[in-house]
Amino acid sequence: MTEMSGAECIVEALKREGVNTIFGVIGGATMTIYDVLMDSDIKHILTRHEQGAAHMADGFARASGKVGVCMATSGPGATNLVTGINTAYIDSSPIVAFTGQVNTPSTDSNSSYMIGRDAFQEADIIGITAPITKYNMQIMKTEEIPEVVKKAFYIASTHRPGPVLVDIPKNTQTNTAEVNFPEKVVIRGYNTHYKADPIQLKRAVDLFVEAERPMVLAGGGIIISNASQELTKLAELLMMPVATSLMGKGSIPENHPLSIGMVGMHGQEANKLILEADVLLAIGIRFSDRTTGNLDEFCPDARIIHADIDPAEINKNIHVDVPIVADAKESLQALYSELTSRLHKRDKSVWSKRIKEARDLLGSYSPPEKRSINPQRIISELRRIVPYNTIVTTGVGQQQMWAAQYFKTYLPRTFMSSGGLGTMGYGLPAAIGAKVAKPDVTVIDIDGDGSFRMTEQELACSVMEEIPVIAVILNNRTLGMVAQWQRLFFNRRLTEVDLGYIPNFTKLAEAYGAKGVQVESMKGFSDAVKRAMKSDVTTVIDVAISPEENVFPMIPAGKGLKDTLWGL
Amino acid sequence: MERSHIISFLVENKPGVLFNVSNMFRKRSFNIESITVGTIEQTDISRMTITVKGDNKTVDQIVKQLNKLIDVIDVSILDRANSVVREMVLVKVCTKSLEDRTEVIHYANIFRGNIIDVSPDSLIIEVTGDSNKIDAFIDLVRNCDLNEIARTGITALSRGPINNHD
């Protein structure tokens, strides 16, 4: 037992969790913590908006696999985290968010600066974030802090990861208490270990043994579980093509002969191939509407094996034939070892030929040549010139889908995008967070002009904190995806999508102390990227593209995979 | 097929848990028909009994989502045939005439209800039983000059040996 203040407790608990970086904005209700933080080895990165702090913690977590930490003051500081927390929640990204709070209720203080009195900068962040966190806790007494922080990191990082919020009233930071730091916590309602049911495993193996056209649909769970190698091994053993969701991108190297790209609203050859499969292993995936399209038309002829660590995902959206509730890596290992002994030679030459044909077709998706600069060419060129291990983050909209289609990803944790919530503005702060986690890796935000502006102030953070990233803005001066829907489904009635010719992104970058480059040719783009990679300051590359450009293929909302539109 | 299901589950007895449970129902568009909460023999645990209407798929999803809540310790669906299901109702009835009063007391006796409050022109009757019995009693006294009804909602336990939740 040691006597210390609540603020000291927080910092000590963070150290014990191995935290070395916190993203946040200081404020009235967190000043005591920051005062202690100042003398610790933990680095604090001052963001320019709390949303940026939450996305940076998320980007840090996705790039490193460790828990990302963000901090905000009470009231508006806390509510500004909300979009970032929800983004992390729906994409199962482990972050712990700390928020300041007004004092705990007390009868012996003649002050109304306390919870429940509508105090200055009081917000019910526990109530607000309950539906968008894996768990949240409010500290009521200083002595609870060590256990609460331990619980927060444990819950955020285990089983299906997700954000946890800890709300810390100001008086619990300043009060002192005798505290004890537990080595581990026991939470009786939280079961982290699910072992695959041997009966279901056997049923899955039976299906695979007889399958003629087996296929995998891999989701973000493969990346979270670090199961890429196991996935690739099983795919090779069974000669199964691997399609991914957006979140699963990077779970198999996209230059692997069995990688067939993304399935879904903007999926390419995989949208066709998956309908031909007779056995589908969907793993680490939650069958989001953007991945499946109309559920009735999703692989109606295939037997579906669904492996996921979260039992609530089984039969939530799709009725499956074989459920496996377990960690992705463990499921893949178990299937592999069972199958090596049971697999007998089957003639797969027809399927093999079909996979090769699909891959060749995928490779032939060439960017249209009609304009010298178009987004597809820009992204393909980017892939060609940046290193193998480059991390790409994206905004949300057309640029996100072009990045998914044309930026081939070779490693897990190198493609990061707001898949579930579709948060415009995710790209830049997530890139900064990823760069903090992987300082030696090139980090590029492929963004749109609309998305970029939602969190552009974090350029100031990247410059002042010396975290150089590259932002490629595919600038169509339009809210492009909405415009695309208006062109396709609203009779070309374009409304409220024109963003105009402002700002000048080069000048905007310069105003923040970053480098700004406007490029007008492919050569100019390549040169700008090469210079930016060598630069020790953040570079914004503004690439003007046509506002008429569409993302194809596309499944219209409510339609199924077979209704994929391949172009105009 | 839509029918009524009873879900009985144990939760941590601490502030915010009821909020988290009801919030999950709200956010996933499940509808609670009735809910009862109370502590069990271990005072740090509460039992919640929720009745919901829905098909099997919906109820399966509700159970899974409840299990996913960190503060929920154990969840089970009660099979009506193997459970004791009880609800209580308090009914306040105006009994201006002696005739009315006799009739109401008569009904109360048939339903093994208790008269727990008497004033010159009203009675409060307590009836306990399964929901059908409560419905039947309310239907009967509805013809009288009915003032107020308070129903507790269902609470229930499975029959047979003790389930050890630890």
Image: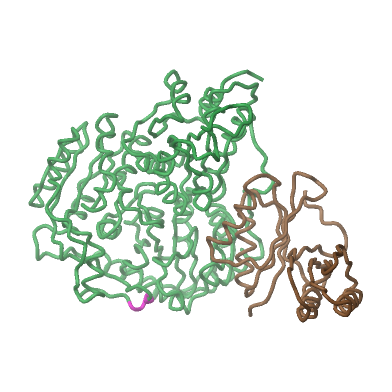
Chain colours: A green, B brown
In the shown orientation, is residue A184 left or right of residue A21?
Answer: right
- Whether residue A50 is visible to the viewer of this picture, yes or no, is yes
Quick one: A298 or A492, which is closer to the camera?
A492
Name the main secondary structure of what is drawn in magenta.
Answer: helix
Q: Residue at x 25, y 60 (%)?
A: A398
Q: Quadrant of the C terminus of chain A?
A: bottom left
Q: Residue at x 88, y 60 (%)?
A: B161
Quick one: A335 or B76, which is closer to the camera?
B76
The magenta stretch spans which residues? A559-563
- Whole-percent x, y for residue A543 in the image: 14, 51
Asked if the magenta segment contains residue A561, the reply would be yes
Asked if the magenta segment contains residue A227, the reply would be no
In the shown orientation, is residue B135 left or right of residue A48?
Answer: right
In the shown orientation, is residue A388 left or right of residue B13?
Answer: left
Tally the marks. 0
- Whether residue A364 is visible to the viewer of this picture, yes or no, is no
Quick one: A184 or A221, which is closer to the camera?
A184
- Whole-percent x, y for residue A86 in the image: 44, 51
Q: Quadrant of residue A136?
A: top right
- Whole-percent x, y for residue A227 in the image: 48, 51
- Whole-percent x, y for residue A565 in the image: 28, 75
Q: Residue at x 67, y 20 (%)?
A: A1
In the shown orientation, is residue A30 left or right of residue A340?
Answer: left
